[in-house]
Image (cartoon, helix red, strand yellow):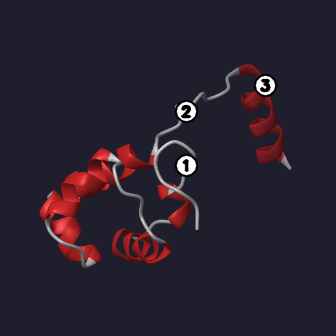
Amino acid sequence: MLSTLVEAYENTHDPIDAPAICSLDALRALLDEHGMSATDLARLLGVHRSMGSKLLKGEPVLTARHLQMLSERFKVSTDLFLDRQNMIPL
């Protein structure tokens, strides 16, 4: 009960305004965190190596299979890679 009251108080008096991160930024951050390049991304997804850099520019869209592969590799939800601006939903 106490934690619920504290959370409600904090949300009202000191809300955290976390900026939304776009899917491409999230993908770039994950690759950087794991020491992976655009070529490594292409290899992971099983596409031609030139597609890695194109994907990071937002040119082609990721397929449902690609989203699943990224989710499994980086242990994150596929939702992280879905936004209306850069990558299409399943």
Q: Is residue 35 visible?
A: no
Q: x, y (%) of residue 30?
A: 30, 56
* Above-or-below relation of 65 to 42: below
Please name the amino acid that badge 1 sits on.
Asp
- Residue found at x 45% / y 70%: 63
Residue 29 seen? yes
Relative to 14, 86 lies left or right: left
Secondary structure under tag 1 reads loop
In whole angstroms, how far apart are the C-alphas of marks 1 and 2?
A: 16 Å
- 59 relative to 11 in the view: left or right: left
Of labels 3 and 2, the one closer to you: 2
- Marked residue nearer the N-terminal end (1 or 3): 3
Q: Which residue is mark 2?
A: 18
The answer to which of 12 and 5 lies nearer the viewer is 12
Q: Residue at x 21, y 52 (%)?
A: 32
> Quick check: 2 left or right of 86?
right
Disc with the residue nearer the chain's start (1 vs 2): 2
Q: Give the label, 1 or 2, closer to the camera.
A: 1
Residue wearing tag 1: 83
* Residue in front for this viewpoint, 35 or 86: 86
Residue 87 vertical position relative to residue 41 in the rendered view, above or below: above
Callout 3 touching callout 2 (CB < 8 Å)? no
Label 1 Cα crowd, 10 Å radius (few <14 / some 14-19 / many 20+): some
- In this view, the mark in front (1 or 3): 1
Is residue 85 found left or right of 32 in the rendered image? right
Q: Which mark is residue 12?
A: 3
